[in-house]
Amino acid sequence: MSAESGISTFRDTNGLWNNYRVEDVATPEGFAKNPQMVLDFYNQRRKELLKVEPNPGHYGLAALEDNFDVQVITQNVDNLHERAGSSSVLHLHGELMKSCSVRNPNTPYDISPDHPEIHLGDKDAHGDQLRPFVVWFGEAVPMIEPAIRLVKSADIFVVIGTSLNVYPAAGLLNYVPNARPIYLIDPNDVQTYRTDIQIIKAGASAGVKQLTEVLKALV
């Protein structure tokens, strides 16, 4: 969703995983082994985020709120949906512009754009070291249950720009009610067991534009 804004992706060609081992920067073990490297990694991601803007895909989803009750469930940790105007965004994997403590990862603290770095020695009110408010591999995904509830109530379900390989997020497809329309927007071929998905083979911006035209016919 955010690639067209210039956000580096993890799994695409030349993505972040080509430069960093997931075990080093996106696991509790990696943080315990080398917290400075992990903090530096996310500090850099934060600085990159502050330099980019939402793309037409983000704005297109926000504009759909004029006619639909749009609930965004995102695996992205950026805040581009909110900056584009989406009013209901559920972050499955945390938020880059927030921190939490190593003792209590479920209590987030806002990070100021004016001071976007977390340093060793930065602590919460209880004296615990701060870390990125990001769900790392091997950690629980506390927002998956609220996401499942949203999916179960959906009249229309849309998947945008995901490989459908990362669980538990990919499993949300299992909770779409029967006979509800499902659209998948992606410029690449995405493997899925579902045969009832309507494919829009395009990037996020062009795909959301096409989706908007389809949905307008329903209003």
Image (cartoon, grey):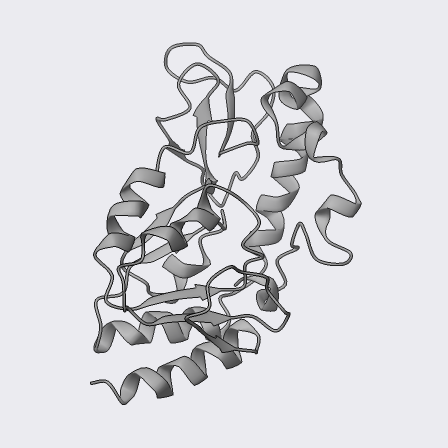
Count of marks placed on residues: 0
Left or right for 15, reference 60? right
Place of residue 195 in the rendered image (x, y in percent of width and height, measured from the top left): 46, 68
Residue at x 46%, y 63% (from the top left corner): 194
Residue at x 45%, y 59% (from the top left corner): 80
Query: In which quarter of the view is residue 126 placed?
Result: top left
Q: Nearer the viewer, residue 94 or 179?
A: 179
Residue at x 57%, y 74% (from the top left corner): 203
Q: Nearer the viewer, residue 195 or 30?
A: 195
Place of residue 95 in the rendered image (x, y in percent of width and height, measured from the top left): 45, 42
Q: Is residue 142 above or below residue 32?
A: below
Place of residue 79 in the rendered image (x, y in percent of width and height, measured from the top left): 44, 53
Q: Nearer the viewer, residue 3 or 198?
A: 198
Q: Is residue 134 above or below residue 103?
A: below
Look at the image and tell me in which quarter the C terminus lies.
bottom left
Left or right for 125, reference 218? right
Q: What is the residue that sits farthest to the top in this orientation?
A: 127
Place of residue 35 in the rendered image (x, y in percent of width and height, measured from the top left): 65, 21
Q: Is residue 91 above or below residue 56?
A: above
